[in-house]
Image: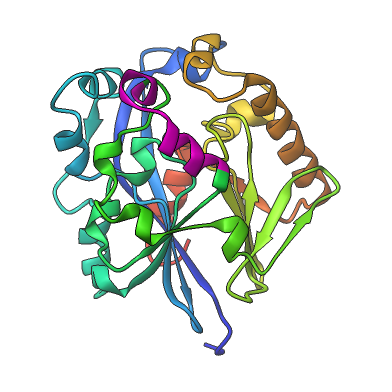
Amino acid sequence: MEKSTVTLQLFASGYCKAEAHIENPISGRGQARFYAVWALWHIPEVGYVMFDTGYSPHFIEATRAFPERLYRWATPIVLAQGETAKEILASQNILPTDIRYIIISHFHADHISALRDFPQARFVCTKASLAEVQTLRGFSAVRKGILHKLLPTDFYERVIPIELLADSMATTEEGLTLYSLFQSPHFQLVSLAGHARGMLGFVYAQDSKKIFFGTDAAWSYETYQKNILPHRIVKLFFDSWQDFVQTQARIRAFEKRNPHFEVLFTHCPKTLEKILACPQDC
Ligand SMILES: [Zn+2]
């Protein structure tokens, strides 16, 4: 393996159950599983960098009391033994202290439940998502999917806004903002407004492997591709419906211009199939 090779692996730590018609009002029936997928890069000059963390038992602790309990009622979770990020990493001989950075796509519990398990990681998120976390409290925070109890006590000493950490910023012709970091030509973070304030995804390109990871800009590739929008009840917790629609249109335009990129979303069944098909190298 050449020195500059940046590897990417995808994993899932648990899932939550929700009504399928919320994700797909046209053909969704019964209950759907929303797997909590996260990514791990190894960057030779930096070390291990995670993108999100999936669920962990901290979610159960953080949702014991009200109003946080409402979150668990809305999205009941299933997390099997050995499925937490810490346990998955241990199976690869990676210690929690080996994780240098965790990119927080956004602050919903299915993306950040294991932050407390990584005592030496620096956290990276957008200024906008950080400002919302610092501002919202009580029921207003829970309504936007934010559980402060999931944050380590020294969170604010360890967090760095991407706007300060990035080497450079650029805007694609579709209007997507890209952040380059760690002097790496192989991946960038991408700003995906709408679902949650200041949400991030990533673009990864190493040799023939090219991935546009859209986080929760859509919940499945199928609905994204067919332009089927979720049930409008999600407006209750989305940051901006208008931005959500515009971001999907921008990703579609990006995909059309870059057809060799595979578009994946955190909770899409296709992403999980990819993980199960190639657990060591997605
Ligand atoms: Zn999510």
* Foreground pick, 49 / 223: 49
Q: Residue at x 73, y 56 (%)?
A: 260
The image's colour scheme reads rainbow
Q: Is residue 132 covered in magenta?
A: yes
Q: Is residue 247 left or right of residue 266?
A: right
Q: Position of residue 112 (x, y in %)?
A: 35, 45
Question: Principal SS element in the magenta part?
Answer: helix
Query: Residue 184 falls in which quadrant of the image?
Result: bottom right
Q: Residue at x 64, y 30 (%)?
A: 224
Q: Position of residue 107 (x, y in %)?
A: 42, 39
Q: Is residue 178 left or right of residue 66?
A: right
Task: From this view, report whether residue 247 is shown above or below residue 201.
Answer: above
Which segment is the magenta one? 128-142
* Foreground pick, 112 / 215: 112
* Foreground pick, 281 / 83: 83
* Foreground pick, 194 / 207: 194
- Residue 251 shows in the view: yes
Q: Is residue 26 left or right of residue 208?
A: left
- Residue 28 shows in the view: no
Q: Is residue 124 left or right of residue 91?
A: right
Count of marks, rendered view: 0
Q: Residue at x 48, y 44 (%)?
A: 130
Task: From this view, report whether residue 83 is shown above or below residue 144.
Answer: below
Residue furthest to the right in view is 173
Task: From this view, report whether residue 52 is shown above or below residue 92.
Answer: above
Q: Is residue 7 covered in magenta?
A: no
Q: Residue at x 69, y 32 (%)?
A: 248
Q: Position of residue 123 (x, y in %)?
A: 41, 58
Q: Position of residue 69 (x, y in %)?
A: 20, 21
